[in-house]
Image (cartoon, rainbow, N blue to C red):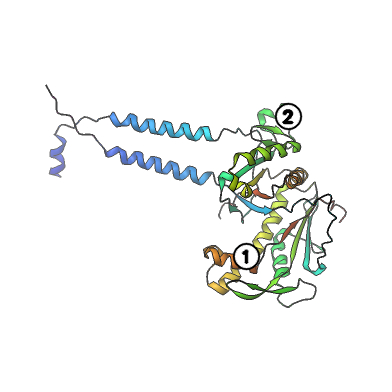
């Protein structure tokens, strides 16, 4: 006890805050980099269905995403609440999938193109009609590797 | 007059490192891309004649989902919870029932002869089927196959399928293939 008591009477050396700014800058840079990577704004509400057997996608960089669901609350006045397809940043129709797949293919390196997976992120309340249309269109573009995005049910 | 510089207090760097660490841990867990992976059949060539794909009737089980999300497997209505057992029974065919799929002796590299089931699961849905019900049915089918693979790998290697190495997994995949056909859209409302 006495040990601690004695040390308290000494002068506490001043705290150097010189390195603090470096760290803050590092954090700042990190956030800047990560936020620019994911710029796509969700325009559809997607509540993924549950599937206990869902497996992880191995090559995330080779994925193209197609989101299907009702427009978000803010846009419902304009677009209604029917399920819609979102590619990249805007609402699109089934016919635009061909161009979308073509540009996505272009952006991947030549060797990896055949491994490109199209991830269908559809809301669980969507009807299969729209999904079937997408699947048929993907078959026509011969983008055959697909994934039905799903979430694992919470462990009980 | 040179003052003596106070020492840099480095006790907080540990805190900051932990903060960063926990941040990375949390974010990398959250953005997990998971789902059921499938391979679509290629679009048939228009110029090419439709090949007569003759598959013996006993080798096919048709799972239909109508617009009210009701399931039919084989030719009887069934609940989603029972689908797994139905598929397992179909694929295993333990008693070599002539109504269930035939098996073909296949030479699997690194394992040897194994009777591989020729069963194909055909999943048909209506345009009005909800996505949720469709994924639930898909999930049950995958679960049935995964459980069969687990049984096989436990019997042969003594551990579950996921803990096997690459080559062993390939053997198991060959022994118990995942033959799911997602057929052209059909109107199943009448059934």
Residue on which the image places disc 2: A79
Looking at the image, residue B83 lies above or below residue A47:
below
Within 10 angstroms of label 2, few (less than 14), some, or many (20 or more) residues? some
Q: Residue shown at 73%/29% (left/top)?
A: A79
Chief SS of the magenta region: loop
Q: Check the image and report above or below for A22 versus A106.
A: above
Residue at mark 2: chain: A
Q: Using the rendered view, name the quadrant where residue A88 is placed.
A: top right
Which residue extends farthest right? Answer: B190
Taking depth in this image into account, of A149 and B133 the one nearest to the observer is A149
Vertical placement of residue B1 versus A133, above or below: above
Residue B37 image point, x, y percent: 64, 53
Q: Residues within 10 Å of mark 1 (few under 14, many from 20)?
A: some
- Image position of B10 with respect to B55: above or below: above
Q: Nearer the viewer, residue B43 or B25?
A: B43
Q: Which residues are magenta?
A: B2-8
Q: Nearer the viewer, mark 1 or mark 2?
A: 1
Horizontal side, residue A59 vs residue B80: left or right: left
- Element at label 2: helix
Name the spot of residue B137 as percent of width and height, x first: 71, 56
Question: For the residues marked 1 and 2, what is the alpha-carbon distance in whole angstroms?
Answer: 46 Å
Reply yes or no: does residue B3 show up in magenta: yes
Quadrant of res B79: bottom right
Tag 1 residue: B173
Q: Tell me, yes or no, whether the highlighted magenta stretch contains residue B34.
A: no
Q: Position of residue A91 (x, y in %)?
A: 70, 32
Which residue is drawn at the image coordinates 24% and 35% (left, top)? B9
Q: Is residue B18 left or right of residue A55?
A: left
Which residue is pictured at 16% across the width and 36% down the height?
A8
User: Label 2 near label 1: C-beta < 8 Å?
Assistant: no
The quadrant the C terminus of chain B occupies is bottom right
Residue farthest top in this picture:
B1
């Amino acid at each position: 006890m006495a040990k601690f008591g004695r040390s308290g009477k000494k002068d506490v050396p001043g705290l150097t805050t010189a390195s603090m700014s470096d760290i803050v800058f590092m954090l700042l840079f990190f956030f800047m980099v990560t936020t620019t990577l994911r710029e796509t704004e969700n325009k559809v509400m997607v509540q993924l269905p549950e599937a206990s057997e869902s497996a992880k996608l191995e090559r995330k960089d080779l994925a193209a995403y197609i989101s299907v669901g009702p427009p978000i609350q803010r846009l419902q006045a304009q677009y209604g609440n029917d399920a819609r397809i979102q590619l990249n940043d805007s609402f699109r129709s089934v016919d635009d999938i061909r161009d979308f797949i073509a540009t996505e293919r272009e952006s991947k390196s030549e060797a990896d193109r055949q491994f490109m997976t199209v991830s269908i992120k559809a809301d669980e309340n969507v009807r299969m009609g729209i999904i079937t249309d997408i699947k048929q269109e993907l078959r026509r573009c011969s983008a055959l590797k697909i994934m039905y995005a799903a979430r694992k049910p919470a462990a009980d | 007059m040179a003052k003596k510089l106070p020492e840099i207090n480095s006790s907080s760097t540990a805190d900051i490192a932990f903060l960063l660490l926990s941040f990375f841990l949390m974010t990398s867990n959250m953005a997990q891309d998971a789902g059921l992976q499938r391979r679509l059949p290629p679009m048939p060539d228009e110029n090419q004649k439709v090949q007569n794909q003759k598959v013996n009737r006993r080798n096919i089980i048709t799972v239909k989902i109508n617009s009210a999300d009701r399931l039919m497997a084989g030719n009887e209505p069934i609940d989603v919870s029972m689908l797994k057992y139905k598929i397992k029974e179909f694929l295993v065919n333990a008693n070599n029932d002539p109504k269930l799929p035939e098996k073909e002796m296949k030479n699997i590299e690194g394992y040897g002869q194994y009777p591989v089931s020729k069963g194909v699961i055909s999943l048909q849905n209506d345009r009005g089927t909800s996505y949720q019900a469709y994924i639930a049915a898909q999930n049950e089918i995958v679960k049935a196959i995964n459980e069969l693979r687990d049984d096989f790998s436990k019997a042969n290697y003594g551990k579950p399928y996921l803990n096997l190495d690459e080559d062993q997994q390939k053997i198991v995949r060959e022994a118990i293939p995942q033959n799911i056909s997602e057929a052209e859209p059909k109107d199943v409302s009448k059934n």
